[in-house]
Image (cartoon, rainbow, N blue to C red):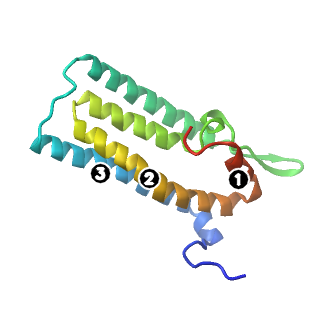
């Protein structure tokens, strides 16, 4: 069976952090959204979030997003459990029970909160675009890597838990 060269990933790449490499690039997209939003905000200054409540909401969103990322990262450490019958993979711990990508949701919540906190419509617009881009490009690549790394166990998890919420 001939495989497409673009979808084939070696086990060495998977073992040596290729998943984290892909994810780090998706986080750069969110960083670029903030930078572009700030630049556009300087050029076209729209202050639409005039009520101070938006700054408080933004601050709360930053804290919630940070908590979600921390919870996700601390939970993902325990995905692999060695038993007397071999290795068992539990992908449904913590927030991964509800979403396959809780760290991305956390980053999106944090960056949207930053947009509210600094009163930048453009940061919010670019963060929404970043969320869409990461979902279409980077998360699909991540999932291919995870499917190759964990096989049927991950496919079962993927069929059971939604990508976002």
| Residue 63 shown left or right of residue 102 in the figure | left
Residue under numbered circle 1:
154
Left or right side of 61 for 164: right
Tag 1 secondary structure = helix
**CA separation, marks 1 and 3?**
31 Å
Residue, far right: 85
Residue lying at 32% horizontally and 26% vertically, measured from the top left:
58
The residue carrying mark 3 is 32
For the N terminus, which image quadrant? Answer: bottom right
Quickly name the residue at label 2: 134
The residue lying at 63 percent from left, 57 percent from top is 146
From the viewer's perspective, is residue 86 above or below residue 56? below
First reached walking from the N terminus: tag 1 or tag 3: 3
* Sequence-first tag of 2 and 3: 3
Residue 55 image offset from top left, x and y in percent:
27, 22
Question: Is residue 23 at least partly visible in the picture?
Answer: no
Give the class, few, some or many, for how many residues have Cα within 10 Å of label 3's Cα (few <14, many ≥20): some
Q: Horizontally, is 21 left or right of 59 in the view?
A: right
Q: Position of residue 57 (x, y in %)?
A: 34, 22
Q: Tell me where residue 129 appears, x and y as whole percent.
A: 35, 48
The quarter of the picture where residue 123 lies is top left
* Element class at badge 3: helix
Are the residues flagged by discs 1 and 2 in contact, CB closer than 8 Å? no
The crowding category of the residue bearing disc 1, from other C-alpha atoms within 10 Å (few below 14, some 14 to 19, many at least 20), is some
| In the rendered image, the vertical position of residue 147 relative to residue 125, given as above or below | below
Front residue of 82 and 104: 104
Q: Is mark 2 in CB contact (under 8 Å) with mark 3?
A: no
The relative height of residue 40 versus residue 95 in the rendered view (above or below) is below
Label 2 to label 3: alpha-carbon separation: 12 Å
Q: Earlier in the sequence, mark 1 or mark 2?
A: 2
């Amino acid at each position: 069976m001939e495989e497409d060269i673009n979808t084939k990933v070696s086990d060495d790449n998977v073992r040596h952090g290729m998943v984290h490499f892909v994810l780090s690039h998706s986080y750069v997209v969110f960083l670029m959204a903030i930078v572009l939003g700030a630049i556009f905000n300087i050029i076209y200054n729209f202050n639409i979030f005039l009520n101070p409540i938006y700054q408080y909401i933004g601050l709360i969103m930053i804290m919630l997003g940070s908590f979600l990322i921390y919870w996700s990262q601390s939970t993902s450490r325990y995905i692999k459990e060695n038993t007397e019958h071999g290795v068992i993979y539990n992908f449904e711990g913590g927030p991964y029970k509800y979403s396959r990508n809780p760290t991305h949701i956390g980053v999106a919540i944090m960056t949207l909160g930053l947009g509210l906190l600094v009163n930048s419509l453009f940061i919010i617009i670019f963060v929404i675009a970043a969320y869409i881009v990461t979902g279409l490009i980077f998360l699909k690549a991540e999932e291919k890597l995870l499917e190759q790394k964990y096989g049927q166990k991950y496919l079962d998890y993927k069929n059971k838990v939604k990508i976002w919420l």
